[in-house]
Amino acid sequence: MIKQIIKQAYWITANTITPEWILSLNIPKRKPRTIDATEHKILLDLVSLAYEIKQLKGKRFSEEELKFKEKIFDGKVKHLRINPTEIQTAYLVEDEKANVVKKSIGIYTKFDTLSYDKFLANVDVVEKMLASLKGYHSLAAHGLQVKFVGSSDISSKAKYESGTDTILINSSKVSGGEEYAGLAYVIAHELGHRYLRLRPQSWNYDAVEWTTTKYSMTDSMHGEEKFAELFAMSNWKSKYGQFADKIKRFEDIIK
C-alpha cells in the first residue's frame, strides 16, 4: 500500500512538472518562508533549464542537446520532495506582483532581490526606450526578453545570453536612463550583441578603426564590444559628437 502511494505521488510529480508548467509559475529568486532552501534551489534550476529547453525547441538541429537538457530536467524533478499542489500554493502571487511582466515590446522577469516598485520602474525605463527605437535599432527589439538579476548571477552590469536569447541586467549595478552606462544605454548596448545574432555581419567590426569608448577596447570572447558600443551610441548620435565620423561610417556599413 505504501509503495503504491509513493509510486502514485511520483507519477503526479513527474507528469505534471514540465518545462511549460514551470515557466507558467512565478518563482522568485528570494525563497518563500514555507519552502525549504534545497527545494527552492531545485526549482530555480528547473526554471533555468526550462528556458533553455524552450529556446532549443525553436532551433534546427538541436534534437540531441534538447534531449540531454530534458533528461537533466527530469532528473532534477525526481529530487523534489514536494508535489505540484504544494509548489503552486507556495509560489502563488497576485497578478499585479507577477515576476514575469509582458509589455507591448518586451518580456521582463524579476530575478533580483530589489523591491517590486523598483522592478516596475526599470521595466518602464526599458520599455519606453524600446518603443522609441527606429530603423535597424528596432529590428533587435522584437520579442526581447530582459531578466533583472543580482551580482551572484552575473558579476558585470549586463550580459546578452545568446542561448536563451535574453538580456541579463544586474539591477544592483545599473540605474538611471539614457545617459552613458545608464539602464537604457546598457540595454541598447546589449541589443547590439543581439542584433549580430539575428543579422550576422560580413565586415570586420572588431577592427581597431571602430574603437570609440574605453569599454569598446574590452577584449571580449566574441570581439563584439566595438560593434555594441557603436550600436548604442548611434541611437543617441547628438550625445556622442566626438565619434560622429565613426557613427556615420557604422550606419553606412551595417546591414
Image: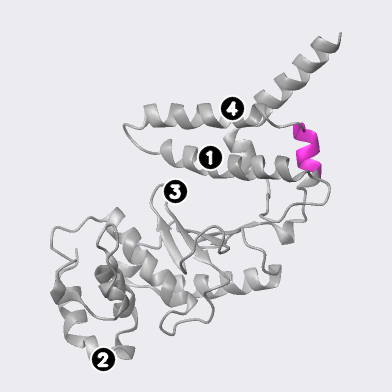
On screen, 182 above or below 161?
Answer: below
- Image spot of residue 180 (x, y percent): 40, 83
Label 3 element class: loop
Describe residue 213's horizontal placement relative to residue 147 as left or right: left
Disc number at residue 241? 2
Give me the C-alpha separation between circle 3 and circle 2.
35 Å
| Residue at figure coordinates x 39%, y 71% from the top left | 188
Give me the C-alpha separation between circle 3 and circle 4.
21 Å
Label 1 element class: helix
In this view, the mark in front (4 or 2): 4
In this view, the mark in front (3 or 4): 4
Quadrant (top left, top right, bottom left, bottom right) of the C terminus: bottom left
Magenta stretch in the rendered image: 82-89
The first of marks 4 and 1 along the sequence is 1
Q: Amino acid at mark 2?
A: Gly
Image marks 4 and 1: residues in contact by CB distance under 8 Å: no
Q: From the image, tell me which residue sits under label 3.
A: 164
The first of marks 3 and 4 along the sequence is 4
Disc number at residue 49? 1
- Image spot of residue 235 (x, y percent): 33, 78
